[in-house]
Image: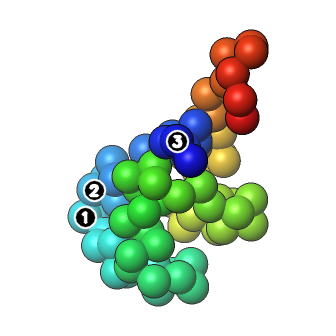
Amino acid sequence: MGKSRVSNIIRRLRFDHDEMTQKALAEAIGVTRQTVVAIENAKYSPTLELAFQIAIVFDKPLEEVFGFTPSKSGEKQ
């Protein structure tokens, strides 16, 4: 499986949110710190529910926190 096509600005949002730690974000959304690390580094795409929870923590619309790059036509998904 290739790199996720879901991007995010979570690291910047954490910094702008009083330098929130990955652990604090993980606790706020009910996952492990390792899950936050994987999402931040685009190694793991969160569920839609988890993505909404992250956006709510930062009081941002979902599309401001996450981006999606569609595959080029002809590429396997």
Looking at the image, residue 57 lies above or below residue 24: above
Query: What residue would you read off at disc 2?
Result: 15
How crowded is the residue under tag 2: few (<14 C-alpha within 10 Å), some, or many (20+)? Answer: few
Which image quadrant for residue 4?
top right
Instruction: Please state which of residues 58 and 66 is positioned toward the viewer in this rendering.
Output: 66
Measure the C-alpha gap from mark 3 to mark 2. Answer: 28 Å
Give the answer, above or below, for where 7 lies relative to 55: above
12 relative to 9 in the view: left or right: left
Disc 1 marks a residue whose amino acid type is: Glu
Looking at marks 3 and 1 on the same chain, the residue that comes earlier in the sequence is marked by 3
Q: Residue at x 56, y 47 (%)?
A: 1
Q: Quadrant of residue 51?
A: bottom right
* Left/right of residue 35 with respect to residue 15 in the rendered view: right
The kind of residue tagged 2 is: Phe
Where is residue 76 drawn, in percent x and y? 71, 29
Quarter of the image for residue 59 reads: bottom right
Q: Which residue is mark 1?
A: 19
Which image quadrant: the C terminus?
top right
Residues marked 3 and 2 touching at CB (< 8 Å): no
- Residue wearing tag 3: 2
Residue 10 visible in the snapshot: no
Amino acid type at image mark 3: Gly
Q: Are marks 2 and 1 in contact (CB under 8 Å)?
A: yes
Q: CA distance from mark 3 to mark 1?
A: 30 Å
Q: In the image, what residue occupies the spot 63% across and 34% down?
A: 68
Secondary structure, mark 1, is loop
Residue 30 shown left or right of residue 72 in the figure: left
Element type at mark 3: loop
